[in-house]
Amino acid sequence: MAVFSSALSSALSSVFSLFARLVEQVADLLQPLCHASAAAAAIVLVTALVRLLVHPLSRAAARGQKAQAALRPRVAELRRKYRKDPARLKKALVALHAEEKVSPLSGCLPSLLQMPAFFLLYHLFSSATIGGDANGLLTHRLFAAPLGGRWSDALAGGGAFGAAGLVYVGLFAVVAAVATFNFLRTRRAMAEGETGGGSGGSGEVMIPGLGAAAGKVMPFMSFATLVTVAVVPLAAALYVVTSTAWTAVERALLAR
């Protein structure tokens, strides 16, 4: 067990070191253009590359959601038929999805595959050392805000509207704009779902008993990103903001 743990720790250290070098090399390429914010620009670019790699899965997820939308009339019929028997309704919904080869969870895979990049950035900018050496990435900044710092550090250093605080104000503004866009789009999709068969927004079929609760909470989920940006290191916050904005634009385009 100790040998396995040591090997896993060594492997993770190697991955972190490689990822750190990747960010540093991209930052060096961007240095003539972005100057002191080159590392921040590198994080945005690496995020875009990750999203490009995941894009084929996002397209597949969009097709899956459209297939779910096509099932709405049949789902509505099943709900009417088994409205007094939730257990049989659940089995019928599962059987329907298996028959049509449509997964209700098809939209989750792209998000899951992005998580490793987020955790790598979180670790890189939360660690004083990488591979036994001092973490030079912690010296980089986005304007006046250090990439390894958090919003609480900016508040303590100069207040919400200090030099570093204004960087977070800008990020919060972007997140709020994207969240509002997602909120309105989700509400519209859910309203269309209700008038088109009652299956739920974006063509997703709700599990009996959870539909009402999910319907109330779902439109507000995008605003949870504000909390994430406020508590993680700025580098990880940049990843979250970039990825969230990408997702909003991507979904709007794929829905057409």
Image (tube, rainbow, N blue to C red):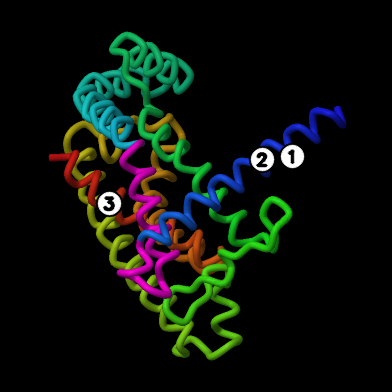
Q: Quadrant of residue 75?
A: top left
* Place of residue 131 in the rendered image (x, y in percent of width and height, measured from the top left): 69, 50
Q: Dot 2 surroundings within 10 Å: few (below 14), some, or many (20 or more)?
A: some
Please tell me whether mark 3 or mark 2 is closer to you in this view: 2
In the image, residue 236 above or below residue 172: above
* Place of residue 107 in the rendered image (x, y in percent of width and height, measured from the top left): 36, 34
Is residue 199 visible in the rendered image? The answer is no
Report the Cα–Cα distance between label 3 and label 2. Answer: 32 Å
Tell me which amino acid carries mark 3.
Answer: Ala
**Sequence-first tag of 3 and 2:** 2
Q: Dot 3 surroundings within 10 Å: few (below 14), some, or many (20 or more)?
A: some
Q: Dot 1 surroundings within 10 Å: few (below 14), some, or many (20 or more)?
A: few
The answer to whether the residue labelled 2 contacts the one labelled 1, judged by CB atoms less than 8 Å apart, is yes
Please tell me the numbered disc located at residue 248: 3
Q: Nearer the viewer, residue 254 or 201?
A: 254
Tell me which amino acid carries mark 1.
Answer: Ser
* Residue that badge 2 annotates: 12
* Residue that badge 1 annotates: 9
In the image, residue 65 above or below residue 169: above
The magenta stretch spans residue 255: no
* Place of residue 21 in the rendered image (x, y in percent of width and height, measured from the top left): 53, 51
Q: Quadrant of residue 175?
A: bottom left
The answer to whether the residue labelled 3 contacts the one labelled 2, judged by CB atoms less than 8 Å apart, is no
